[in-house]
C-alpha cells in the first residue's frame, strides 16, 4: 500500500532537513571538537589534547568554576526535587480530586508560567525579593528555580496521570486499601516514569537557567551558566568549550536516563 | 426487616441523581444469601450505577443499602466486605499475578505468607497456578479475567460484584466462563451480583434476574418467570425474541381473557390483573411456542401466508403474513423429532399456539 505522506516525494525535503540539522548541530559539534584542541586559539586546529579539560579542573579559573558547578548542582537537585513533589501533589489534586471550584483556573495558573517571557519573570522575581527584603544569594536563586521548575515538572507528571485509569485505585480501595494506601501502593508506582521525567526536565531547566539566575543572584554568587557568561565576557578561551562540552555531556546523560526509565514502564509490566 | 440473615443485600428506595438527571429512580430489591443474582438491562439503565453504589464508588442520593442487616451506604469502599470484578479487570500492571491476588488480604492486615498461601489456593481454583509469577500484560484476555476473579474472591467477600466481566471475551470463551462462574458460585457459596446487558447470559447463569430500564426496576424473578411471564412490553421485548401484537380485550372470564387482533383473529390467553374488557394492550407470543400446519388444528389458529423461511441451524424460522394483519415469526427446532415442517414461501398456512404461548402485557 502506498504511504499517504511518502517523504521522498516532496521536493527539497532532503535539502531542508540537512539545513535544519546543520544549523542545530554544527555549532555543538564545533564546540565539542575544538574543546580537544591543543591550542590557545579557538579557531586554529593544532592537534588532539585534553589540556583544556585539565585546565578546567586545575587551571587558574578552576576554583571559580568548581564553586559555580557545585552551586548549580545543589540548586538543580533541590529545586527539581521540591518542584517535582509540588507538581505531583498538584496533578493529584487536579486530576484525582473530582471537580472543585477553580479547578480550571488551577490548571491554567500552573502552566501559565511557561508562556510568560523569562525576562518578565526575572524582573518580577527580582522586584518581589526586593519588596520583601530578602538578601540575594543562593537562597533567592533556589526559591526562583523552584518556582519556575514547577510547570516543567507538572507537564510529564500530569500527562502520565491522565493515562492511568481511575479504576486501578478503585480496585485497590475495593480490596480494602485506604485512600493513602491506594495512592502509595498503586498510583505512585504507576506514576514513577512521569515523575522521573518531570524531575529530569526540571533538573535540566534549572541547571542551565541563566536569565532569572542572573537577576536574582547576589554579588559574588555564581552558578555555572553565569560563571561561563562572566568568563566569556573577558574573551572566549578553549576552556569554555571544554566546560560547555561537559555540560552537554551531563544533559545527554540525563536525557538518556529519562528515556531508559520511560522504556521500563511498570504499567506495561516490564 | 433487613436483619434477616437470608438477605445478603437489601436496597431500600435507592435514588441516584446526577444534578437533575435521575440515574436510579427509587429502586428497592432484596438479594438473597448465596444466590446468583443478575442485574440485566440495556446500557444506561442504571444497573452499573446500582452495582457501584453497593461497592461504594457512588454515593446514594436517597435511600439505604444493607449488607446482612448492616447499613453500608455511608461506608467507604475499603470498609465494605464486598469485592468487585471490574469490566476492564483493572489488574495492577506493576504487580505479578500472585501479588495481585494477594493484595486484598495484605490490605486486610494478613501476613505476607498468609496472603500468598491463600492467593495460591484461589489461583488453583481458577486453574492459573502456573501463571503466578507472570505480569498481567503477559496473559491473554481470558486469563486476565480469571485473575480478576481470583483477586476478588481471595479475601472471601460476603458478596461478589461482577460488572459485565465477560463482555470483552469472544463468544466461545464467554460461554465457557459462564459455566465456570456458575460453578464457582455454587462451590464458594458466595452471593454473586452480576451485571450484564446480555439477556441470554442472564438466563443461563442466574437464580434470579432483575430487569432494569431507564433507572427503574421492570421485573424481578427467576429466569423462567421472566421469560415466560414477562410483566410488561419492555421485558417481553428485551428478553428473547417475541412477536408483539396490539390486541383488544373483548371479555374476561374464569381467569381467561378473550381478545381479538385487528377484528379478524381471535385469541384466548390467561387474564392479567389490571387488564379488563375494552383494553387495547400488547400481547407477546414467543416464536418457539407457535407451530405451523397446513390446516388449522384449533378454532383459534391464525391464517396466513408464508413470506420467508430462514435456516438458522438449530432452528428454522418462518415469517408468516397474517391475513389482513401483522407479521409473525414462528420458530421450530431443526430435528427429525421436532416440528420443523418446511413450508415454502407463498404457501397458505395456519399458525397454531401451544397452551400458554400468548401473554398479555401492561405497557
Image (tube, coloured by chain):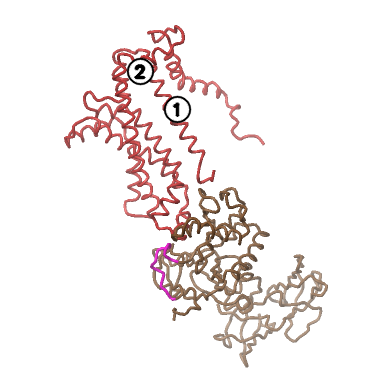
Chain colours: A red, B brown
Residue at (53% x, 56% y) in the render: B116
B268 left or right, relative to A111: right
Q: Examine the image and state in which quarter residue B88 appears.
A: bottom right
Circles 1 and 2 on the same chain? yes
Q: Examine the image and state in which quarter residue B343 appears.
A: bottom right
The residue closer to the viewer here, A194 or B186, is B186
Q: Is residue B228 magenta?
A: no
Residue underneath mark 1? A252
Rendering coords of residue A136 (x, y %)? 21, 30
Rendering coords of residue B306 (x, y %)? 77, 72
Residue at mark 2: chain: A
Rendering coords of residue A237 (x, y %)? 35, 12
1 vs 2, front mark:
2
B318 left or right, relative to A6: right
Q: Is residue B77 magenta?
A: yes
Query: Which quadrant of the rendered structure holds the N terminus of chain B?
Result: bottom left
- Quick one: label 1, few (<14), some, or many (20+) residues within 10 Å? few
- Quick one: label 2, few (<14), some, or many (20+) residues within 10 Å? some
Residue at (17% x, 37% y) in the render: A132
Q: Which mark is residue A57?
A: 2
The residue closer to the viewer here, B217 or B358, is B217
Q: Which residues are magenta?
A: B69-80
First in sequence: mark 1 or mark 2? 2
Q: Which mark is residue B116?
A: none
Considering the numbered disc 2 on the image, is that residue within a helix, a strand or a loop? helix
Residue A165 vs B223, above or below: the answer is above
Amino acid at each position: 500500500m502506498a504511504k499517504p505522506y511518502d517523504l521522498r516525494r516532496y521536493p527539497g525535503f532532503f535539502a531542508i532537513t540537512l539545513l535544519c540539522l546543520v544549523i542545530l548541530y554544527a555549532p555543538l559539534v564545533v564546540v565539542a571538537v575544538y574543546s580537544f584542541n591543543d591550542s590557545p586559539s579557538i579557531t586554529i586546529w593544532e592537534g588532539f589534547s585534553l589540556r583544556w579539560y585539565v585546565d578546567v579542573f586545575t587551571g587558574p579559573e578552576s576554583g571559580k568554576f568548581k564553586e559555580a558547578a557545585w552551586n548549580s548542582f545543589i540548586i538543580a537537585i533541590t529545586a527539581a526535587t521540591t518542584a517535582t513533589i509540588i507538581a505531583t501533589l498538584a496533578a493529584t489534586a487536579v486530576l484525582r480530586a473530582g471537580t472543585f471550584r477553580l479547578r480550571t483556573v488551577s490548571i491554567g495558573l500552573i502552566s501559565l508560567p511557561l508562556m510568560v517571557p523569562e525576562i518578565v519573570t526575572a524582573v518580577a522575581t527580582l522586584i518581589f525579593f526586593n519588596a520583601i527584603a530578602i538578601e540575594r544569594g543562593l537562597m533567592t536563586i533556589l526559591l526562583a528555580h523552584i518556582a519556575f521548575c514547577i510547570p516543567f515538572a507538572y507537564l510529564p507528571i500530569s500527562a502520565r496521570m491522565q493515562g492511568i485509569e481511575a479504576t486501578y485505585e478503585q480496585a485497590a480501595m475495593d480490596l480494602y486499601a485506604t485512600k493513602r494506601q491506594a495512592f502509595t501502593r498503586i498510583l505512585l508506582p504507576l506514576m514513577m516514569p512521569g515523575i522521573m521525567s518531570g524531575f529530569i526536565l526540571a533538573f535540566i531547566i534549572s541547571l542551565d537557567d541563566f536569565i532569572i539566575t542572573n537577576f536574582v543572584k547576589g554579588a559574588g554568587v555564581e552558578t555555572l551558566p553565569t560563571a561561563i557568561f562572566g568568563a566569556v565576557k573577558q574573551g572566549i578561551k578553549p576552556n569554555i568549550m571544554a566546560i560547555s562540552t561537559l555540560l552537554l555531556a551531563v544533559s545527554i546523560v540525563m536525557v538518556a536516563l529519562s528515556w531508559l526509565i520511560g522504556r521500563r514502564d511498570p504499567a506495561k509490566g516490564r | 426487616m433487613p436483619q434477616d440473615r437470608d438477605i445478603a443485600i437489601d436496597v431500600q428506595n435507592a435514588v441516584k441523581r446526577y444534578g437533575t438527571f435521575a440515574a436510579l429512580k427509587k429502586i428497592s430489591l432484596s438479594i438473597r444469601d448465596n444466590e446468583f443474582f443478575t442485574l440485566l438491562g440495556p446500557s444506561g439503565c442504571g444497573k452499573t450505577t446500582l452495582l457501584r453504589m453497593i461497592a461504594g464508588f457512588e454515593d446514594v442520593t436517597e435511600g439505604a443499602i444493607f449488607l446482612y442487616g448492616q447499613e453500608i451506604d455511608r461506608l467507604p469502599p475499603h470498609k465494605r466486605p464486598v469485592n468487585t470484578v471490574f469490566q476492564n479487570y483493572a489488574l495492577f500492571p506493576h504487580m505479578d499475578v500472585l501479588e495481585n491476588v494477594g493484595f486484598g488480604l495484605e490490605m486486610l492486615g494478613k501476613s505476607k505468607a498468609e496472603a500468598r498461601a491463600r492467593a495460591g489456593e484461589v489461583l488453583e481454583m481458577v486453574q492459573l497456578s502456573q501463571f503466578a509469577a507472570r505480569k498481567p500484560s503477559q496473559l491473554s484476555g481470558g486469563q486476565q479475567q480469571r485473575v480478576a476473579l481470583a483477586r476478588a474472591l481471595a479475601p472471601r467477600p460476603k458478596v461478589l460484584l461482577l460488572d459485565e466481566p465477560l463482555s470483552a471475551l469472544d463468544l466461545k470463551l464467554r460461554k465457557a466462563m459462564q459455566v465456570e462462574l456458575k460453578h464457582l458460585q455454587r462451590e464458594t457459596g458466595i452471593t454473586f451480583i452480576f451485571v450484564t446487558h446480555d439477556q441470554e447470559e442472564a438466563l443461563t447463569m442466574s437464580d434470579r434476574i432483575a430487569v432494569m430500564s431507564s433507572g427503574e426496576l421492570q421485573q424481578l424473578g427467576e429466569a423462567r418467570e421472566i421469560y415466560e411471564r414477562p410483566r410488561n412490553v419492555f421485558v417481553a421485548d428485551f428478553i428473547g425474541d417475541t412477536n408483539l401484537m396490539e390486541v383488544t380485550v373483548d371479555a374476561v372470564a374464569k381467569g381467561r381473557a378473550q381478545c381479538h387482533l385487528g377484528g379478524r383473529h381471535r385469541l384466548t390467553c390467561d387474564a392479567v390483573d389490571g387488564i379488563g374488557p375494552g383494553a387495547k394492550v400488547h400481547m407477546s407470543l414467543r416464536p418457539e411456542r407457535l407451530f405451523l400446519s397446513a390446516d388449522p388444528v384449533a378454532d383459534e389458529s391464525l391464517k396466513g401466508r408464508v413470506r420467508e423461511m430462514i435456516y438458522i441451524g438449530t432452528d428454522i424460522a418462518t415469517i408468516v403474513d397474517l391475513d389482513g394483519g401483522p407479521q409473525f415469526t414462528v420458530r421450530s427446532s431443526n430435528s427429525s423429532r421436532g416440528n420443523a415442517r418446511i413450508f415454502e414461501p407463498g404457501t397458505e398456512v395456519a399458525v397454531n399456539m401451544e397452551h400458554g404461548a400468548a401473554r398479555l402485557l401492561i405497557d
